[in-house]
Image: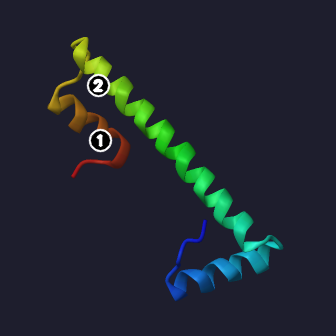
Amino acid sequence: MDIPLKPEFETKLNRIASETGRAAAQVVEELITGYFEHDEWFRSEVRKGLASLDRGEFISEDEVQQRIDRTLGPR
Protein backbone atom coordinates (compact mmCIF):
# COMPACT_ATOMS: atom_id res chain seq x y z
CA MET A 1 0.00 0.00 0.00
CA ASP A 2 1.30 3.41 -0.91
CA ILE A 3 0.19 6.38 1.14
CA PRO A 4 1.07 9.84 -0.13
CA LEU A 5 2.52 12.12 2.55
CA LYS A 6 2.80 15.87 2.64
CA PRO A 7 6.41 16.84 1.96
CA GLU A 8 6.89 18.15 5.51
CA PHE A 9 5.68 14.81 6.96
CA GLU A 10 7.97 12.86 4.68
CA THR A 11 10.89 15.04 5.78
CA LYS A 12 10.07 14.44 9.45
CA LEU A 13 9.60 10.71 8.86
CA ASN A 14 12.95 10.41 7.13
CA ARG A 15 14.65 12.41 9.90
CA ILE A 16 13.18 10.20 12.63
CA ALA A 17 14.09 7.06 10.72
CA SER A 18 17.64 8.26 10.22
CA GLU A 19 18.05 9.37 13.85
CA THR A 20 16.76 6.06 15.20
CA GLY A 21 18.48 3.80 12.69
CA ARG A 22 15.23 2.34 11.41
CA ALA A 23 13.66 2.20 8.00
CA ALA A 24 10.92 4.75 7.32
CA ALA A 25 8.45 1.89 6.75
CA GLN A 26 9.24 0.52 10.22
CA VAL A 27 8.60 3.92 11.82
CA VAL A 28 5.27 4.19 9.99
CA GLU A 29 4.28 0.67 11.03
CA GLU A 30 5.06 1.45 14.67
CA LEU A 31 3.04 4.66 14.49
CA ILE A 32 0.06 2.89 12.94
CA THR A 33 0.27 0.06 15.47
CA GLY A 34 0.27 2.59 18.31
CA TYR A 35 -2.70 4.37 16.80
CA PHE A 36 -4.71 1.15 16.44
CA GLU A 37 -3.86 0.07 20.00
CA HIS A 38 -4.90 3.46 21.40
CA ASP A 39 -8.10 3.46 19.34
CA GLU A 40 -9.00 -0.02 20.62
CA TRP A 41 -8.31 1.03 24.23
CA PHE A 42 -10.31 4.25 23.85
CA ARG A 43 -13.33 2.51 22.35
CA SER A 44 -13.24 -0.07 25.14
CA GLU A 45 -13.18 2.68 27.78
CA VAL A 46 -16.13 4.44 26.12
CA ARG A 47 -18.09 1.16 26.09
CA LYS A 48 -17.33 0.71 29.81
CA GLY A 49 -18.49 4.25 30.53
CA LEU A 50 -21.71 3.81 28.59
CA ALA A 51 -22.41 0.51 30.36
CA SER A 52 -21.84 2.26 33.68
CA LEU A 53 -24.35 4.95 32.71
CA ASP A 54 -26.84 2.27 31.66
CA ARG A 55 -26.52 0.78 35.17
CA GLY A 56 -27.17 4.23 36.68
CA GLU A 57 -23.61 4.55 37.93
CA PHE A 58 -22.50 8.14 37.53
CA ILE A 59 -21.50 11.18 39.55
CA SER A 60 -23.04 14.63 39.60
CA GLU A 61 -21.67 17.63 37.76
CA ASP A 62 -20.69 19.14 41.13
CA GLU A 63 -18.66 16.04 42.02
CA VAL A 64 -16.94 16.17 38.62
CA GLN A 65 -15.98 19.80 39.27
CA GLN A 66 -14.72 18.95 42.76
CA ARG A 67 -12.50 16.20 41.33
CA ILE A 68 -11.17 18.55 38.67
CA ASP A 69 -10.46 21.20 41.30
CA ARG A 70 -8.62 18.67 43.48
CA THR A 71 -6.52 17.60 40.52
CA LEU A 72 -5.90 20.92 38.77
CA GLY A 73 -6.75 23.47 41.43
CA PRO A 74 -9.78 25.76 41.59
CA ARG A 75 -10.66 27.71 38.47
**Element class at badge 2:** helix
Quickly name the residue at label 1: 68
Q: In this view, does 23 lie above or below 15?
A: above
Q: Residue furthest right?
A: 21
Instruction: Name the spot of residue 38 as percent of width and height, x first.
Output: 52, 45
In the image, residue 52 lies at what x, y percent? Answer: 30, 18
Please give the name of the residue rendered at 24% of the width and 34% of the height, measured from the top-left corner: 64
Distance from the alpha carbon under mark 2 to that under mark 1: 21 Å
Q: Is residue 70 above or below residue 52?
A: below
Q: What residue type is labelled 2?
A: Leu
Left or right of 18? Residue 9 is left
In which quarter of the view is residue 65 placed?
A: top left
Q: Residue shown at 77%/78% (left/top)?
A: 19
Q: In which quarter of the image is residue 12?
A: bottom right
Q: Residue pushed farthest front? A: 1
Task: Locate the N terminus by quadrant.
Answer: bottom right
Colour setting:
rainbow
Callout 1, which amino acid?
Ile
Q: Residue at x 24, y 20 (%)?
A: 53
Count the numbered circles shown. 2
Task: Say which mark, if any, is on residue 50.
Answer: 2
| Residue farthest top in this picture | 55
In front: label 2 or label 1: 2
Q: Which mark is residue 29?
A: none
Counting other residues with Cα less than 10 Å from the Cα at mark 2, is it few (<14), some (14-19), or many (20 or more)? some
Residue 68 screen position, x and y as percent:
29, 41
